[in-house]
Amino acid sequence: MFCSVTSAQTPALKPRIDKLAEGLEKKVVAWRRDFHQHPELGNREFQTAAKVAAHLQALGMEVKVNVAKTGVVGVLKGGKPGPVVALRADMDGLPVTERVNLPFKSDVRTEYNGQQTGVMHACGHDTHVAMLMGAAEVLASVKNDLRGTVKFIFQPAEEGPPAGEEGGAQLMVKEGVLDSPKVDAIFGLHINSQTEVGTIKYRPGATMAAVDSYAIKIKGKQTHGASPWAGVDPIVTASQIVMGLQTIVSRNLPLTDNAAVVTVGAIHGGIRQNIIPEEVNMIGTIRSLDANMQKTIHRRIGEIATNIAESAGAKADVSIEIMYPITYNDPKLTDQMAPTLEALAGKDNVRLTPAQTGAEDFSFYQQKVPGFFYFLGGMSKGKKLEDAAPHHTPDFQIDESCFVLGMKSLCHLTVDYMEQRTKVASR
Ligand SMILES: [Zn+2]
Ligand SMILES: [Zn+2]
């Protein structure tokens, strides 16, 4: 419905956009290879950001740099009045040593958390940057016909800032990236190494999980390992708590509504075979796709840990750190924009995807303004799924033939949203 309205209003705009995007393919591939060969970790994307800023400046945009450390924001004012649409790409690489033999393979090495490691764009953020630079060039070329403003957001540290630093989308929002001009809607995509080129996947509502971490400190009473009755054993207590935590998802949550995960990731306690230690510390991660379920998990972790500890004569201190919110695709906006993707990629190639228990800091933008986040297939056609390495692994690889569709999707969403909004406003 929306598409027909759009094409009637600006008959020439989308074909022009498509032609421009196709013409930019080689340039976008070259950018991507350059970024791929020179990956930078979160909050350290200095070279990447400099290249992005130079490109946006050359397109005649008003450009802000050093937003949330290394972020770059470009504002493109269209020739006609209308809403402000934000498009977002993330720029950071990961501490992963690349194993794929590509001519533009990364040889970058660094120290991370005290260990030597390679640095690699093992999540495909290099492709996001290159495609958004391409989309910026396309939209700048047709700016006189744009009914509104486009804000290009290149953000650092999606994978999380280094310990002790702020960063990522949360800091971008804190520094006002969604204000002046105020953003009406935000779009973002993520490449996917295990979805075929030509396919786009999305989900209305909760799409990726909220992440929280928790820490439990169990205090017992130290004693000789040969006479446990003389103390309070925090190791046995911790073991009971681990088992107790398993009942949260299996016994306390309405599982037909949404998935959830409670994982214990580490337990530390003790130093020697014949000493029962004073204290055990454990940490873990929580994933949830529903705010009420999230609350229940937090409450139950506290109840289970403190009550089991009490029953053993020990004491448990529980702390929960709220990290990433749920990546939540505004249902109205998703309904409104899905036809745009279907018209572009073909109805059969646009599919609903199950919710994921991984997280995305795009969620911080969506907490403030309606947002739509979708997945772009980047696996070579005909490749077997078992041969396609997952994200964050040394063999991760992307087929570059998906870039044109990626660029077009960002541009089509932008112009369709603008057309729809100005149409509604003039009614
Ligand atoms: Zn990632
Ligand atoms: Zn990612």
Image: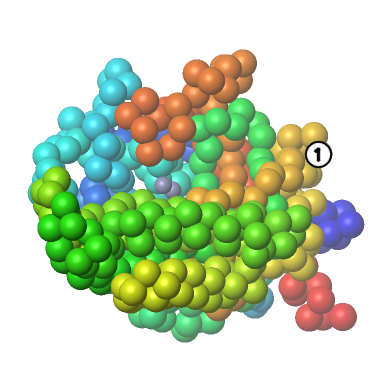
Q: Residue at x 29, y 68 (%)?
A: 218
Quick one: 280 or 358, which is closer to the camera? 280
Could you tell whether 244 is left or right of 318 in the image?
right
Indicate the quadrant where residue 372 lies: bottom right
Quick one: 140 or 376, which is closer to the camera? 376
> Is residue 175 something one can see in this rendering?
yes
Locate residue 98, reporting x and y percent.
27, 29
Q: Residue at x 18, y 57 (%)?
A: 227
Could you tell whether 246 is left or right of 172 in the image?
right
Q: Residue at x 57, y 75 (%)?
A: 295
Q: Amino acid at mark 1?
A: Lys
Q: Which quadrant of the rendered structure holds the C terminus?
A: bottom right
Q: Which quadrant of the rendered structure holds the N terminus?
A: bottom right
Indicate the quadrant where residue 16 lies: top right
Residue that carries the numbered disc 1 in the rendered image? 347
Quick one: 336 or 97, which is closer to the camera? 97
Locate residue 38, reporting x and y percent.
23, 39
Quick one: 95 or 266, which is closer to the camera? 266
Q: Is residue 405 above or below residue 81?
A: above
Q: Is residue 83 above or below residue 71?
A: below
Locate residue 416, reporting x and y percent.
72, 60
Label 1: which secondary element: helix
Q: Is residue 427 above or below residue 108?
A: below
Q: Residues within 10 Å of mark 1 (few under 14, many from 20)?
A: some
Indicate the quadrant where residue 155 lies: bottom left
For the rendered model, the colour scheme is: rainbow
Locate residue 411, reporting x and y percent.
61, 53
Q: Residue at x 33, y 57 (%)?
A: 236
Could you tell whether 336 is left or right of 186 in the image?
right
